[in-house]
Image (spheres, rainbow, N blue to C red):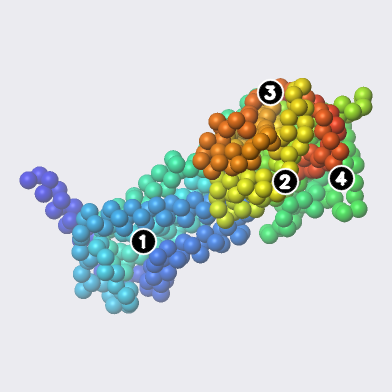
Amino acid sequence: MRMKQKLSALSGWDRTLFHQVAARRWPAAEPVLPRLSRSANHGLLWFGVAAGIAVVGGRPGRRAALRGVGSLALASATVNTVGKGAVRRSRPLLEAVPVIRRLRNQPVTTSFPSGHSASAAAFAVGVALESPRWGAVVAPVAWSVAFSRIYTGVHYPSDVLVGAAIGTGAAFALRGLVPARKDLVPAAQPRADAPALVEGRGLYVVVNAASGPPALLSPPAERLRAALPQASVTERTEDDDLAGLLEKAARQAAEHGGALGVHGGDGTVNLAAAVAVRHGVPLAAFPGGTYNHFTLDLGIETVEDTAGAVMAGTAVAVDVARFTSLDASGADPVPFLNTFSIGAYPELVRYRERWARRTGSWPAGVLAAVHVLRTTRPVEAVINGRRRPIWLLFAGNGAYRGVGLAPVRRRDPADGLLDVRIVDGGPFARTRLLAAALTGALAHSPVYSAALLRRLRVSGLGAGAHLAYDGEVAPAPTELLLDKVNEALVVYRPLAR
């Protein structure tokens, strides 16, 4: 009896509020809300918003848009397969709703819950979980769409509230399955001392304008000057020597107790890191390349992320890996911050990243492996004293997550370890490797091996062999040594996300 009374009271409140909205005049809403409500049919409004965010927002915007659309899809599936069939509630009567507000084509499905409200909330919350800034932009539109369903008379308020709750739950459920980027960034260890440079005073930045895709909004130098107005910013032209500019900037930073800054991709940042270590100054790395693996692993996605860390003086110490040619005595080590490889790995990564936009990371990795192993030949090498043909040798600066041929993310760039992965090239190795990749049993394949090492010696490389490191390709010496210098580089990064 009490339950029936509560449901009756709730229904009465629902209808009363519905009629209060219908009876009130909303002059500014009359030309807007019905159109907005129609535009959200089948999610078309949100697909358009997602496309705009992806174009304007760069990499963070693309991730936010993708998460918003994924959350919308999950919410829509939940409402249409479970919600609508569980409670067969009739739509409100339209007598109380002014004709000017009514939709031309009235929905024919049941009223509870509101699918439009679920989609709006799912998209807005999904976007906000990945990018709070874009979430704040989308939220008023989502709220307006949800309210428009009451305003146009197609839903009761409780339909809208429950729909919004389902949409919010869908966004958080998706985050549980696929964590947002900020959820994957680990706590920064170990922290390091670096000066807090207010407005960038004492920061000397070199911008490699030739690195990365063209800027869609404003040139990188302008963004840097806006974020750090007191920083010294030098733009490199095609005729300038990048290494020379970095050396000059590092000397100035050392003289003034400041820091070296660099805007560019992984190859540019790698070069700047070696200069910063040599001069004993912290590095401020501003992402400006196509992929920016090093900065992303530090939780840096935008120029503003690095600028905030520079002004706050928050920094960490990271390892610097290196390879040294043993063909002649006295060769200088060549540093790398991300990855080193011999064999097919450079081509594998190139194809995987090209196809991942269309197929997703795992399918793209399998397709890339199929293509590269079909078109390349093994390289003969002696690894730690054992001669073996290899399809590829990968060495990461720090342990990377997951099992695979081309890992892309790591948790701790200061763990003192090299993540070494080798694919052998013996009899039937190609067929066995492809079968393992397709069945998900790569970790147990006899042609695939992985180990965490502190150093690795490679020799017996023939003429014509090449190596790749941080996006750079060079002829390989016949013999080389891979090792690391622990916590050699101090780099700014935001510690609280």
Q: Nearer the viewer, mark 2 or mark 4?
A: 2
Residue 352 is situated, as x and y percent measured from the top left of the image, at 64, 48
Q: Is residue 46 above or below residue 127?
A: below
On the image, numbered disc 4 is attached to which residue?
242
Q: Is residue 402 left or right of residue 38?
A: right
Residue at 26% of width from left, 65% of height from top?
109
Q: Nearer the viewer, mark 1 or mark 2?
A: 2
Residue at 61% of width from left, 53% of height from top?
355
Question: Which amino acid lies under the numbered mark 1 shown in the image of this protein?
Answer: His
Tell which of 494 and 417 is nearer to you. Answer: 417
Q: How packed is label 1: few (under 14 Cα within 10 Å), some, or many (20 or more)? A: many
Q: How packed is label 2: few (under 14 Cα within 10 Å), some, or many (20 or more)? A: few
On the image, numbered disc 2 is attached to which residue?
376
* Quarter holding residue 271: top right
Question: Which amino acid lies under the numbered mark 4 shown in the image of this protein?
Answer: Leu
On the image, numbered disc 1 is attached to which residue?
116
Structural distance between the alpha carbons of marks 3 and 4: 33 Å
Q: Nearer the viewer, mark 3 or mark 1?
A: 3
Q: Is residue 362 left or right of residue 385?
A: left
Q: Secondary structure at mark 1?
A: helix
Structural distance between the alpha carbons of marks 2 and 4: 34 Å
Q: Are marks 3 and 1 in contact (CB under 8 Å)?
A: no
Q: Are marks 2 and 4 in contact (CB under 8 Å)?
A: no
Label of residue 453 in the image:
3
Structural distance between the alpha carbons of marks 3 and 2: 27 Å
